[in-house]
Image: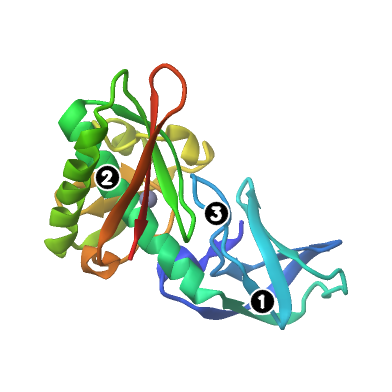
Amino acid sequence: MTRRLFWEDMYAKEFDARVVSVSGARVALDQTAFNPRGGGLVSDIGALDGRRVLEVVKEGEEIYHVLETQDAMAVGEQVHGVLDWDRRYRIMKMHTAAHILSSVVNTETGALITGNQISPDESRVDFDLESFDRSKMSYYIDKVNQAVARELEVKTFFMKREEALATPGFVKLANAMPPSLDMLRIVQIGDVDTQADGGVHVRNTREIGKVQGLRADNKGKSNRRLYFTVQ
Ligand SMILES: [Zn+2]
């Protein structure tokens, strides 16, 4: 299992690691600060010893860095990783904002979240909702910004799987968590949202700044998609 440095310190911008496997342009390390694609988040990008990292993916508990070049790294080699931090920090803000938006819409309408896509420039959250009043969009975004302005602390901790499953509301996207894990990582945003989640977030909602609603789309009979960004 790749040690996930981004769980220990979500603000780690650089790190040292040892190469544990190389397959073409795919490199696995003993530890990494690169957050892989998954749970609706795009992957981090950056560099490993000056070679560009185009994407980072996970397979089971293993994390693979897809390099631009195949000029091989050797197993056992020590490498230095550097994240594209501006991009990652926006992903952290967007993701934390997505939690708050989901919570606001769920509280206001009872709708369940069916998916999300978190990117540095524009993100979206999908809801299972038969009718969506577009004029309500700015009202929801105002509610989100009110929560952001309360400077809520974002805490992460681990909890036994059975315990988390038994707590209502904690496991909203159960498939986001590998079934092999006995412990689930829980993310708690003040009194707004608590759920099992492997992704990266900011430490305090004040870092988000301001959330801006972009548009709302209908995707099928009951799927509503809200787009937003952070400033
Ligand atoms: Zn999250």
Q: Is the residue under label 2 in contact with that under label 1 (CB below 8 Å)?
A: no
Q: Is residue 99 visible?
A: yes
- Circle 2 packing at 10 Å, graded few (<14), some (14-19), many (20+), is many
Direction from residue 194 to residue 143 in the image, left or right: left
Q: Earlier in the sequence, mark 2 or mark 3?
A: 3
Residue 162 at x, y = what percent? Answer: 35, 34
Mark linked to residue 101: 2
Q: Is the residue under label 3 in contact with that under label 1 (CB below 8 Å)?
A: no
Q: Which residue bears the numbered disc 1?
A: 47
Q: Is the residue under label 3 in contact with that under label 2 (CB below 8 Å)?
A: no
Query: At label 2, which amino acid type do we have?
Result: Leu
Residue at image location 63% in from the left, 51% down from the top: 58
Q: Which residue bears the numbered disc 3?
A: 42
Quadrant in the picture for residue 215: top left
Q: Secondary structure at mark 3?
A: loop
Quadrant for the N terminus, please: bottom right
Q: Is residue 158 visible?
A: no
Q: Work out which residue is located at the far front of the displayed protein and give it.
A: 135
Direction from residue 113 to residue 145 in the image, left or right: left
Query: At label 1, which amino acid type do we have?
Result: Ala
Direction from residue 194 to residue 185 in the image, left or right: right
Query: At label 3, which amino acid type do we have?
Result: Val
Residue at image location 86% in from the left, 61% down from the top: 24
